[in-house]
Structure formats: structure tokens, C-alpha cells
Amino acid sequence: MKMKKAEITNTHGETKASLKRAISKYSEVKKAEIKITVVMLCMEGYGSNEIAQMLCIHKDTASKYVKLFNEGGLDKLLDYKTSPGRKPRLTEQEKEMLHEALLSTPLDMNCGESVNRTTTELQTFIKNEFNKELCTAAILKMLKNMGYSFTRPTYVLAKASKKNS
């Protein structure tokens, strides 16, 4: 059984020249260049098998791009729906409480006696306050997203004592 050749049935007012301009316009959109190139090659009369070989993509992908363009033009071809992702472990209210707690000392937080905060101490605080368990990597990532940065403590006291001797 011979497959039907992919063809542009509705140009939506697009020409090869306007598609070339669109490639530079949508340069920040992932895979936009390949999608628009598929449509341009199809306008020139190439089939989906030939286009797939030229661009090193699957023939079904090339056919899908042509179908999307025929249905809704560039808008539908370049429409990206992102997944919502996983829900954060801590709510915004809990993050705000954590932020306020980070402004106090670890002794006030009831999670350690050291001067420097560690992720282990924060794990203890989160477990005690919110009854939720987070791994160290999750805590570091969350703090980075909240605007905090990780630094290693320096031994200022040891340097100061050498000067006094």
C-alpha cells in the first residue's frame, strides 16, 4: 500500500520568504527551525520520507509537523504546552515561615547549636515544624530558588588568634 504524500493544503498566508523570516523570529523556541524547515521543504514538493532523511528526523514527525501547519499555521505548529510539573513539597506559606526562621539563629529555630546553618539542621526544622521530610538536594534547590546561596564557612577566629599572638 502506497502512503499518501505529505502536502501543504492551507498556507495560511505564509510564503517561503515569510517562513525564512519566521526561523529567525522564533530562534528562541526549541525545535522551531526544524519545524519550519519541514514546512518549507514540503512547500517545495518534498515528501515526508525525503524530508525525514534530509533532517534526520522520523517520517511520522515530519508528517505531524505538516499536519499541524495545515490545521492552524505557524501558531499551531509552534504552540508548546508545558506540563505543570510536580507540586512543591512546601506550600508558599510554609516557605515564608522558613524564610522568617532563616533570619533567626539556629538556636532559636531549635534545630542546632552551631553558628552556621547546615542542610541537616534545616531538615530537622522542616520535619519539626511542617512534618515533612526533604532530602538535602531538595533543600539546597529550594533555597537557591528562594534567593539564598551556599557558602562554606571560613575560619576567621583562627586567623584572628594568630594576629594577637
Image: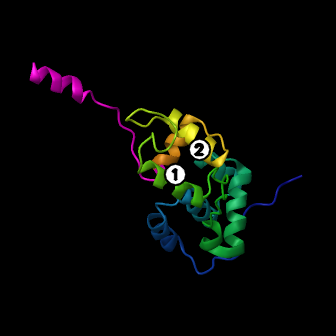
Residue found at x 10% / y 23%: 164
Amino acid type at circle 2 is Ile
Asked if marks 1 and 2 touch (Cβ < 8 Å), the reply is: yes
The reply, left or right, for residue 156 in relation to residue 89 is left
Residue 61 rendering spot, x and y as whole percentages: 70, 53
**Front position in the image: 60 or 163:** 163
Please say whether residue 154 is one of the residues in the magenta stretch: yes
Give above or below for 139 relative to 15: above
Image label count: 2
Residue bearing the label numbered 2: 126
Please say whether residue 24 is one of the residues in the magenta stretch: no
Where, by quadrant of the figure, is residue 156 drawn? top left
Q: What stretch of residues is rendered in magenta?
A: 145-165
Label 2 SS: helix
**Front position in the image: 121 or 37:** 121
Question: Taking the image as drawn, is residue 85 in sight?
Answer: yes
Mark positioned earlier in the residue sequence (1 or 2): 1
Label 1 SS: helix
Residue 37 rendering spot, x and y as whole percentages: 56, 60
Residue bearing the label numbered 1: 98
> Could you classify mark 1 by the number of other residues whose Cα lies within 10 Å: few (under 14), some (14-19), or many (20 or more)?
some
Residue found at x 76% / y 60%: 5
Where, by quadrant of the figure, is residue 155 drawn? top left
